[in-house]
Every structure is written in structure tokens, then in C-alpha cells.
Amino acid sequence: MKELVWEVIIHCKKCNTDTKLIDPPELSSENGWIKKKAKTISDLPPIELLVKPNFSCSKCDSIEIKSHIELIEQN
């Protein structure tokens, strides 16, 4: 059975690097109810309901980032 996991892509505007996180704890703790409620991707509530944590660049620790968050299916 496929499992739903959070995929976060962080693009740092300062050092111009991309970092991909899978199921970061900061996101899961605030938004765990979304994964429990959604059995498949199509069951997801609107992404606007997502509580976005303050991520920073893993390379230079800058907070000047752009993040993209998705719930994806993973084996």
C-alpha cells in the first residue's frame, strides 16, 4: 500500500540551491490531521489550510527561501 508523505522543496534565494525534504517533523506535527484525513491524494483538503513552518536553507541557514509543499504517494 502506498503511504502519503510530505515533500518539501526549498529554494534558497541567497545561495541559489534547492533542498528536498521528505516528511520533515516541523510539517508533520502541525499538519498531521491532514494525512490522517486523506486516504489518497484526491481526498486532500485545500492546501491553503496547511500550516507552513518557517523553513531555512540547509546549506547557508538563510530564511530567504521559497518553499513548495506537496503530499505525495510513496511506496
Image: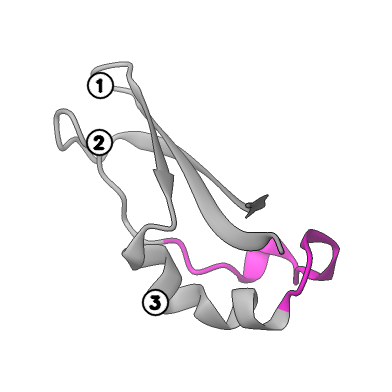
Side of 53 where 51 appears, left or right: right
Mark before the other along the chain sequence, 3 or 1: 1
Kindly identify which residue carries mark 2: 57
Kindly identify which residue carries mark 1: 14
* Magenta-tinted stretch: 38-52
Closer-to-camera residue (54/36)? 36
CB under 8 Å between discs 1 and 2: yes
Side of 24 where 4 appears, left or right: right
**SS category of the residue bearing label 1:** loop
Label 2 amino acid? Cys
Mark before the other along the chain sequence, 3 or 2: 3
Side of 70 where 2 appears, left or right: right
- Disc tally is 3
Q: Say few, some or many: other residues with alpha carbon within 10 Å of mark 1 (under 14 / 14 to 19 / 20 or more).
A: few
Question: Furthest-front residue in view?
Answer: 1
Foreground label between 3 and 2:
3
Kindly identify which residue carries mark 3: 29
Colouring mode (rainbow / by chain / secondary structure / one colour): one colour
**SS category of the residue bearing label 3:** helix
Q: Is residue 27 above or below residue 61?
A: below
Label 1 amino acid? Lys
Foreground label between 1 and 2:
2
